[in-house]
Amino acid sequence: MNILLIGGGGREHALAWKLAQSPLLDTLYAAPGNPGIAAEGARCVALDTGDHDAVLAFVAEHDIGLTVIGPEQPLVDGLADTLRAKGRKVFGPSASAARLEGSKGFTKDLCSKYDIPTAAYGRFRAAAEAKDFLERLTPPYVIKADGLAAGKGVVIAETRADADAAIDDMLGGRFGEAGAELVIEEFLAGEEASFFALCDGKTVLPLAGAQDHKRVGDGDTGPNTGGMGAYSPAPILDEAMQARVLAEIVEPTARAMAAEGSPFIGVLYAGLMIGADGPKLIEYNARFGDPECQVLMMRMKSDLLPALLATAEGQLDHFALQWSDNHAMTVVMAAEGYPGTPKKGGTIAGLNAAEADGAKIFHAGTTLGDDGALTASGGRVLNITAMAPTLRAAADTAYAAIDRIEWQDGFWRRDIGKAAL
Ligand code: AMP
Ligand code: GLY
């Protein structure tokens, strides 16, 4: 089968690496892909994925049996709908189902209607009402832009003044249309973890848990990023807790989406707060996490291709996946300046030596020049990934690999996994 993979980050490289191992794969196309994805044997194509008719034409021309959509934007834009309407198989939710990620207010209302545990909340379009609502809460205050804001749409304010300022800022147009409506919610205490499950519209197939590191600096300091490192399994998501998350949060969500006429087809990424009274949903994403996908793919022993296909075909009942009990870790190497303006163009060398002791390097923002030189071309650039019987050993392998990479502008967190170690 030929597959079209949409995206070109570390998440998509990890998916490409897994798909390339499948005996069922003929040709893997990636749009736009990246040099790491190309090195897995994929054909990287310049396809404007915002042009849905162009994607449809590509799928027909190249006999694509399954399109796998990595990032959220094409999902929210309805690319899966366009393809499905023409009878094409897609791994990824409809625009309507992707509202689980694309509208925080939608998800909060769904949780409220179907008794899915989450923080108490209000939805607001007017600053005065939003500020009145703060009177009913105790600090810290949690203020969120409703729509997609590239991970920057959440403010946790310690004081009323900061909270008021965040409300004015967001409603004042800082995130454009995405911030025209706000969700204000109760602050949840506890430990954060992410849980992933495939959903074919009816059946939920649990994948695994992972823990991300969102802040740019060691010790969880500095601004939020897309994620600076991850590990799996997440100790807090032991078997009993996973069973609760499935029964109390993920399965009721899948049933609710089907009941609302928006069955979810793809991967549900539940961001959770595990507190004294059990797991609560912080947010959903309608796609794999990046870099969480990288550690999940390392641990997945089964062939990924039939799992994605079964999801797209509504055939997940009686489907099972095998997982390694080993611990996987990925450390993100980012370019100086990230999450602000990253320094681009620096030369990267030493990747073969870095992989020699068992680490796997997934590319994100890299470019391969005509002269064969690899350069940095994004914020998050490399994902140094390792798996071992202990998290400590995985960390040792990943950090030893980083020491062999020659890239002047790169930086990385030195404490990935510290909480679990
Ligand atoms: P989100 O983009 O919704 O995942 O929020 C970004 C981060 O803000 C989360 O990873 C949490 O650390 C934090 N956060 C969001 N909502 C809450 C909440 N209700 N209580 C405590 N922390 C939260
Ligand atoms: N690593 C967080 C995300 O993918 O949203």
Image (tube, helix red, strand yellow):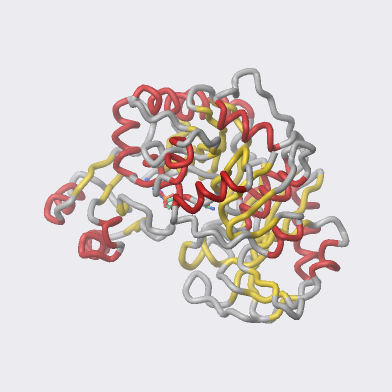
Image point (60%, 38%), residue name: 236
Name above or below for residue 374 compared with residue 203: below
Q: Nearer the viewer, residue 51 or 368?
A: 51
From the top left corner, tell me how far across and down residue 359 is, in percent. 80, 57
**Residue that sits furthest to the left in the current view:** 128
Q: Nearer the viewer, residue 392 or 171?
A: 171
* Res 241 seen here: no
Q: Nearer the viewer, residue 284 or 80?
A: 80
From the top left corner, tell me how far across and down residue 4 is, in percent. 61, 47
Q: Quadrant of residue 30?
A: bottom right
Number of labelled discs? 0
Quick one: quadrant of the N terminus?
top right
**Residue that sits furthest to the top in the current view:** 318
From the top left corner, tell me how far across and down residue 248 is, in percent. 46, 25
Specify whether 32 is left or right of 398.
left
Image point (55%, 35%), residue name: 89
From the top left corner, tell me how far across and down residue 178 is, in percent. 30, 55
Q: Quadrant of residue 65?
A: top right
Name above or below for residue 212 compared with residue 351: above
* Res 169 seen here: yes
Q: Quadrant of residue 401?
A: bottom right
Image point (43%, 57%), residue name: 151
Q: Nearer the viewer, residue 161 or 184?
A: 184
